[in-house]
């Protein structure tokens, strides 16, 4: 397999209903740094590879769905992943999910607050391996009303700050 690099820039490469299938790749890198990109898309990560998704664009990755897969590593940077679904992800080494916000100047609006609200996250470690799962919710009200299920992890770490993780089931 090879690396699969997808940049969802200003064009509509990653329009609604797009399915990114990287099951034959060794590494998947998806860049959704442009506003409104990667909404309503489905992503199938590489089997026993690395899956890296950057959702740093304003309102990027809303309603993104990660389809069941077994990966070595999974890294997701979300600044606007409302109603995200990670379903049946099996992790061999580690998973890192960051629900963060952009820094803003005093008095300006922060459209990224509430990142990962209403998310559904289901991650399972491989019992014979040492899988670590780290979920960080540092944006204001991020990961609120969410469902996070982690099974067979060697280490599960959840960091919630600024009113995050309220009304969530962990």
Image: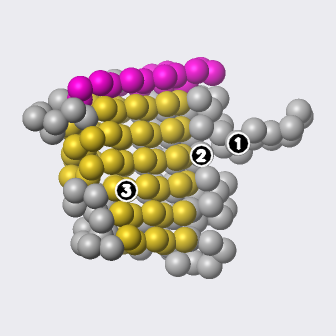
- Tell me if I can see residue 69 in this picture: no
Residue drawn at (35%, 40%), measured in percent from left and top? 95
Q: CA distance from mark 3 to mark 2?
A: 17 Å
Residue sticking out furthest to the right: 107
Helix, strand, or loop for circle 3?
strand
As drawn, 56 above or below 24: above
Q: CA distance from mark 3 to mark 1?
A: 22 Å
Could you tell me which quadrant the C terminus lies in? Answer: top left
Helix, strand, or loop for circle 1?
loop
As drawn, 3 above or below 112: below
Asked if the residue at tag 1 contacts the one at tag 2, i.e. Cβ–Cβ closer than 8 Å, the answer is: yes
Residue beneath label 2, please?
A: 79
Residue 152 spot, x, y in % from top left:
18, 30
Q: Is residue 152 magenta?
A: no
Per the rendering, the mark at residue 102 is 1
Q: How many marks?
A: 3
Per the rendering, the mark at residue 57 is none
């Amino acid at each position: 397999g090879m690396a699969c690099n997808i940049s969802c820039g200003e064009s509509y490469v990653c329009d609604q209903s797009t399915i990114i299938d990287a099951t034959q790749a060794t590494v998947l890198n998806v860049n959704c740094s442009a506003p409104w990109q990667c909404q309503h898309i489905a992503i199938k990560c590489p089997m026993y590879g690395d899956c890296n998704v950057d959702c740093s664009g304003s309102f990027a990755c809303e309603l993104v769905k990660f389809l069941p897969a077994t990966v070595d590593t999974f890294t997701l940077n979300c600044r606007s992943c409302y109603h995200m679904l990670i379903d049946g992800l099996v992790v061999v080494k580690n998973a890192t999910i960051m629900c963060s916000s952009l820094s803003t100047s005093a008095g300006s609006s922060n459209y990224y607050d509430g990142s990962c609200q209403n998310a559904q996250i289901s991650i399972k470690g491989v019992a014979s391996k040492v899988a670590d799962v780290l979920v960080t919710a540092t944006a204001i009200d991020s990961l609120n009303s969410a469902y996070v299920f982690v099974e067979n992890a060697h280490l599960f770490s959840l960091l919630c700050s600024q009113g995050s993780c309220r009304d969530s089931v962990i």
